[in-house]
Image (spheres, rainbow, N blue to C red):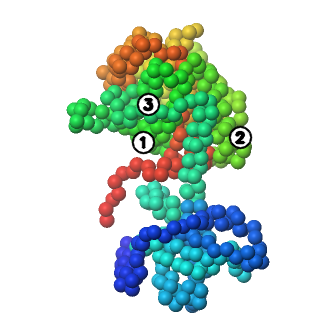
Amino acid sequence: MEDLNLVLRERLQKAEQLERDGIPLYPNGFPVPDRISDIIQAYEPRSAEELESEPRSFTIAGRVMAVRSFGKSTFMHLLDSGGKLQIYIQQNEVGKERYAVAKRLDIGDILSVSGALFRTKTNELTLLVKELALLTKSLRPLPEKYHGLRDVEIRLRQRYVDLIVNESVREVFRKRARIIQVIRDFLAGKGFLEVETPMMQPIPGGATAKPFKTFHNALGIDLYLRIAPELYLKRLLVGGFERVFELNRNFRNEGISTQHNPEFTMLEFYQAYATYEDLMRLTEELFGELAMAVNGGSHEVEYQGQSINLAPPWRRYRLVEALVEVGGLPLAALMDAEQTVRIARSLGLGAERFEGHGKLLTKIFDHLVEPKLIQPTFISHYPLEVSPLSRRNEADPSVTDRFELFIAGREMANAFSELNDPRDQRERFQHQIEARQAGDEEAHFMDEDYIRALEYGMPPAAGEGIGVDRVVMLFTDSASIREVIPFPHQRPEKKN
């Protein structure tokens, strides 16, 4: 810490001296017509002779990432959002006064430079600087040997530094943007309309989760940050929009892990006159599009040392089938409520009084089967008890027309044929209220306005939610959700 304070004092003194010498530290109005990535793409293939025969001046701006001085000449590396380029500053090219400024620059400073390209004796593409201007003075040093920022907590807390010094981190967020754009284009091509729904809701609905609560002074009411946009998107189906989607931010007041962040991005889409089976096929197609677009045109994805094949068709199990075939449990025991309780307790899973047979089966599945589903797998026919918004299966009313998608041992998507009978929905909500009164903090609230909307008539439909952050984790080989969220939530920083 003392060493850092010394460097900070030295940098501040240097900055103050530059100002006394008439050099503005934070000027404005310097247009930057050229990008380093464009220059590299166009001119990296050219030889030294070709560059010399067709001289052209470029103006770029970027952050100083390395400095090597040799008396009256200095090499630097400049980094902009697209790439890194070496620049060469000579006193006889920029003048004694400008070169004196260049000699006083630090790693981390942001410069604007103009000049022509050439190749050094080591054949590195380099810009010979003719003009130079300091645009931003950096008062804090970058991590030593600027590629050495490895402490995870510091990287996430100071993501701005992480992005400066780690190209691989910048690439994760470029790929994230590409994934979101592909999703938008795919759904728009299928006739879906992108919409926006409230992020503050009087009743938190659409999922079983604990919400964040706030208070609206002007309205004098409690509001909740949304845990899901589902019930508002289905209101749009009632209103006549037959295909809608939203890329939305959701908030759940729950634990933090490598797979969970309190604030996360979810894709939800709803299609009238479709079933959950239609969405299985659509999901396979969407992931195929993503793989081809962001994974080098291959359905094979390497994730944490495992090769995952996203080429359809994917495996499909009913939940009970998966418990038997993947989990190795006897079917007869799973059909008996008392034996199911004993299985749950033998696995270290509590059996709360508000948890019925269906919820226990799902808990056992989550613990025993989910981690084993590495290749893409659809699990369908979830118990009614854990699916308060799903349509009952006509052949077996104890389960629902619902599926979840698992890849790499974790849930990636949840979808179902929608319940559009307002009488059945009211009864389901009532059961959720009873579960909440028995101690289930994640049970669904009663939503009278949503029931009223269903009473006007919602067409038969299917809907799906896909965790965008987990999709990005898959396609960027990221072990933790915190690696794919620019600014993940953390505990308060300890003060020295």
Does residue 109 sit above or below 202 in this rendering?
A: below
Residue to which mark 1 is pinned = 263
Residue 224 found in image quarter: top left
Residue to which mark 3 is pinned = 229
Does the residue at mark 1 contact the one at mark 2 (Cβ under 8 Å)?
A: no
Disc 2 from disc 3: Cα separation? 31 Å
Please tell me which residue is depicted at 63% across the width and 79% down the height of the picture.
128
Q: In the rendered structure, which disc, 1 or 2, sits on the residue that comes first in sequence?
A: 1
**3 or 1: mark nearer the eye:** 3
Q: In the rendered structure, which disc, 2 or 3, sits on the residue that comes first in sequence?
A: 3
Q: Residue 338: x and y, percent?
A: 47, 16
Residue to which mark 2 is pinned = 299
Please tell me which residue is depicted at 31% across the width and 65% down the height of the picture.
496
Disc 1 from disc 2: Cα separation? 29 Å
Residue kind at label 1, given as amino acid type: Glu
Does residue 195 sit above or below 102 in this rendering?
A: above
Please tell me which residue is depicted at 41% across the width and 10% down the height of the picture.
423
Q: Nearer the viewer, residue 272 or 8?
A: 272
Residue kind at label 2, given as amino acid type: His
User: Crowdedness of circle 3 by 10 Å Cα count: few (<14), some, many (20+)?
Assistant: many
Q: Residue 188: x and y, percent?
A: 59, 34
* Residue 20 numbered tag: none
Secondary structure found at label 2: loop
Which quarter shows the N terminus? bottom left
Q: Is residue 410 left or right of residue 307?
A: left
Task: Tell me if I can see residue 464 in this picture.
Answer: no
Total residue callouts = 3
Q: Nearer the viewer, residue 46 or 297?
A: 46
Q: Nearer the viewer, residue 178 or 475?
A: 178
